[in-house]
Amino acid sequence: MPSSTDGQKEPAFEKDAELHHQPTSWPGARPAACLGASDRGDKVSTLDLTGHGKFTVLTGIGGQGWVDAAKAVAKELGVDIAGHLIGPRQPWQDFSGDWARSREIRDSGVLLVRPDQHVGCARMRSAATRRRICAKP
């Protein structure tokens, strides 16, 4: 079974974990970051984009391939998978820098968020085998 984190180590807490919240996109966490809609400027949370009974792909400006792969897998398996691009000149922008600080993936990486709004899988960067990673064995 492939690792849900590309082999990267869990980030250490910068402050006392018992006293301070540390935003993270580590699998099992809820990926909360403040974003803005590029066409309206409305503020939303990444949590507003996830859940709603479906899986969600969150990726940066280099992650269109992940969104395309998610659409293909969704069609093949008959499940709903939403895809959101976050970054400059994308539908969702990171005006406050919250996403950049907490995402723990590169602009071409991806977070697969489960319907319960928890990260199920994180990939640091684009992979030539995107569909193989996401598709059933």
Image (cartoon, rainbow, N blue to C red):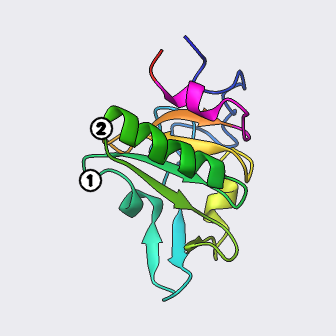
Frontmost residue, 54 versus 64: 64
- Is 53 left or right of 61, judged from the image as shown? left
Q: Residue 130 in magenta?
A: yes
- Counting from the top left corner in percent of width and height, residue 84 is at 51, 59
Q: Name the residue type under label 1.
A: His
Frontmost residue, 107 versus 42: 107
Verify CB contact (< 8 Å) between mark 1 and mark 2.
no
Residue 118 in sight in this render = no
- Counting from the top left corner in percent of width and height, residue 52 is at 26, 53
Label 1: which residue? 52
Badge number at residue 119: none
Label 2: which residue? 78
For marks 1 and 2, the one nearer the N-term is 1
Residue at x 72% of width, y 26% of height: 8
Q: Viewer-nearest of labels 1 and 2?
A: 2
Q: Residue 41 in magenta?
A: no
Residue at x 52% of width, y 68% of height: 34
| Alpha carbons under labels 1 and 2: distance apart | 16 Å
Q: Name the residue type under label 2.
A: Gly
Residue 1 in sight in this render = yes
- Counting from the top left corner in percent of width and height, residue 90 is at 62, 72
Magenta residues span 124-135
